[in-house]
Image (spheres, rainbow, N blue to C red):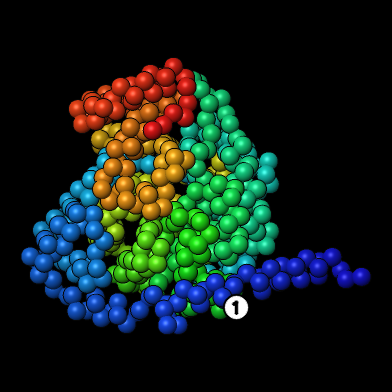
């Protein structure tokens, strides 16, 4: 009889060997080539050096019309160095965000489920060769305890659920975790609280696996390319690993779309390669999805490389992005893909988040813990050997909500659009014409009221009340036909009814 350990190893090896399905890549190629043309990107960046001021202003008008920019137009903006023009770009980015998404900011929390991983990415604390890492996969009961803290003590309504790539965290396990999270319902001061949307950040999957997750009711499917520069990608992702397959990852969102998951999130890890190239790569990805499926990315993320425990690559990286360049890349992404949601994460410190948020961001996390089991169990939320990287901002949700309110932003806990069928092409059309922002404003007021009553500190309630009064006055003036129904929902929410939405 074969030893049990060998059987387990054999099963894991079979799982790895069958992970990549090449026929689900080649079907999307254009004459055998992928949509990232590195030479063309480099040429466009070079040919658009020293951009003309008048041309830049014309491009900004196109962004304000909520039209996706071309490669040349985006390369032009990336090369702007004039301080006055950069200020105009930043102002326009804020205007685009206000036009499409109004003044709301969606909050969420990451929930790290497992740091088991068969890959060996040079920049990642989860890489399999990192012997310092303390490995763990949460049980269903542990997932429920994490969720109870997130919904019962903090008040989150939306998660991004994060997994390493391993046979022990296959699609069936992922599906069971999403169901477990959805099952948790906690009584609060005035009503009840539960997670209403679980987005998933996991390794690229096959169309068949993605259909399983679609059935269980996941939200956005999020896969970051890390770097779009193929040569660099192959240098930082060993070729004997699943993640070493550049094209399998590059076409992850195509497979998600084909599987019916029409809300997808893309991103690059800035600091692995030249930041201008990565912005052009993100734009290439957005345009490719628009052309192939008629729908661009629901969200774009732009994390910067951060230090990770026992991970030398993250120390003084060659392509580290300065704060000023970070401001510019966020601004250009907002202008280049004006309809998309933009996610600013707690990798950045509090001061940097204050600077970046007005440049077009729509989502941010708070009360963030990224250790495995860190919400319910860990007293030290920055235990390096239990997390993928080090965080820059670990402030509470209450503190972040209060600061947003002081700056004139209403925190939205709304997930209504997804449950009303406003996803994919439908939501893209509503975003481009500004109508989705109207729904979102109404639902933001209701969900903000709910969160204030259930979770906010007295200081946050005081500031939040003033903001809600302002928002209601604006709705009465600009959307008079919807005002009576808003107030009906609002009063019922104050009385303890929960999860009301337009």
Q: Give coordinates of residue 370: x percent, y percent.
A: 52, 49
Q: In this view, does 16 lie to the left or right of 91?
A: right
In the rendered image, the vertical position of residue 11 relative to residue 467, given as above or below: below
In the rendered image, the vertical position of residue 121 relative to residue 479, given as above or below: below
Q: Give coordinates of residue 315: x percent, y percent.
A: 43, 66
* Front residue of this view, candidates 328 and 133: 328
Tell how many labels: 1
Residue 10 can be seen in this image:
yes
At horizontal 38% and vertical 33% (from top left) the residue drawn is 502
At horizontal 57% and vertical 63% (from top left) the residue drawn is 207
At horizontal 59% and vertical 73% (from top left) the residue drawn is 21
At horizontal 32% and vertical 51% (from top left) the residue drawn is 429
Secondary structure under tag 1 reads loop
Q: Residue furthest right?
A: 1
Residue 465 can be seen in this image:
no
Q: Give coordinates of residue 322: x percent, y percent.
A: 29, 63
Q: Is residue 61 left or right of residue 372?
A: left
Q: In which quarter of the image is the N terminus?
A: bottom right
Read off the residue under disc 1.
240
* Front residue of this view, candidates 409 and 179: 179
Instruction: Using a 10 Å C-alpha cutoff, classify the residue at mark 1 as few (fewer than 14 neighbours), some (14 to 19) or many (20 or more).
Output: few
Q: Which residue lies furthest to the left in this view?
A: 54
Q: Give coordinates of residue 125: x percent, y percent.
A: 54, 62
């Amino acid at each position: 009889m074969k030893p049990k350990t060998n059987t387990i190893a054999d099963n894991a090896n079979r799982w790895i060997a069958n992970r990549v399905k090449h026929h689900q890549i080649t079907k999307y190629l254009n004459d055998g080539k992928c949509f990232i043309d590195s030479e063309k990107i480099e040429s466009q960046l070079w040919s658009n050096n020293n951009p003309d001021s008048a041309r830049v202003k014309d491009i900004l008008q196109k962004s304000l019309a909520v039209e996706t920019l071309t490669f040349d137009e985006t390369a032009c903006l990336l090369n702007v160095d004039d301080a006055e023009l950069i200020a105009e770009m930043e102002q326009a980015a804020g205007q685009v965000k206000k036009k499409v998404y109004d003044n709301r900011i969606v909050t969420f929390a990451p929930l790290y489920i497992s740091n088991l991983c068969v890959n060996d990415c040079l920049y990642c604390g989860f890489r399999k060769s990192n012997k310092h890492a303390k490995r763990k996969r949460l049980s269903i009961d542990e997932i429920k305890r994490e969720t109870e803290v997130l919904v019962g003590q903090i008040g989150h309504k939306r998660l991004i659920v994060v997994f390493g790539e391993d046979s022990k965290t296959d699609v069936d396990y992922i599906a069971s975790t999403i169901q477990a999270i959805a099952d948790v319902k906690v009584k609060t001061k005035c009503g009840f609280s539960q997670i209403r949307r679980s987005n998933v950040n996991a390794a690229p999957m096959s169309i068949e696996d993605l259909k399983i997750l679609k059935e269980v009711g996941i939200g956005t499917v999020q896969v970051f390319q890390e770097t779009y520069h193929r040569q660099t990608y192959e240098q930082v992702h060993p070729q004997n690993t699943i993640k070493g397959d550049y094209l399998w990852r590059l076409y992850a969102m195509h497979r998600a779309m084909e599987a019916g998951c029409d809300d997808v999130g893309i991103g690059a890890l800035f600091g692995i390669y030249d930041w201008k190239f990565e912005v052009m790569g993100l734009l290439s990805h957005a345009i490719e999805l628009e052309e192939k499926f008629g729908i661009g990315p629901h969200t774009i993320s732009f994390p910067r490389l951060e230090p990770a425990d026992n991970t030398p690559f993250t120390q003084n990286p060659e392509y580290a992005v300065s704060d000023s360049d970070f401001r510019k890349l966020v601004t250009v992404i907002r202008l280049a893909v004006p309809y998309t949601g933009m996610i600013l994460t707690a990798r950045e410190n509090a001061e940097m988040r204050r600077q970046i948020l007005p440049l077009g961001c729509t989502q941010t996390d708070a009360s963030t813990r990224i250790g495995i089991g860190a919400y319910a169990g860990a007293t030290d939320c920055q235990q390096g050997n239990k997390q993928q990287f080090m965080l820059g901002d670990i402030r509470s949700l209450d503190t972040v909500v209060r600061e947003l309110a002081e700056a004139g932003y209403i925190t939205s806990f709304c997930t209504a659009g997804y449950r009303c069928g406003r996803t994919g092409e439908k939501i893209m059309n509503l975003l481009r014409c500004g109508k989705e922002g109207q729904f979102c404003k109404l639902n933001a007021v209701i969900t903000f009221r709910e969160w204030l009553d259930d979770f906010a500190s007295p200081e946050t309630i005081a500031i939040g009340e003033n903001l809600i009064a302002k928002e209601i006055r604006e709705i009465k003036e600009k959307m008079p036909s919807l005002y009576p129904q808003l107030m009906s929902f609002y009063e019922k929410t104050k009385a303890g009814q929960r999860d009301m939405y337009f």
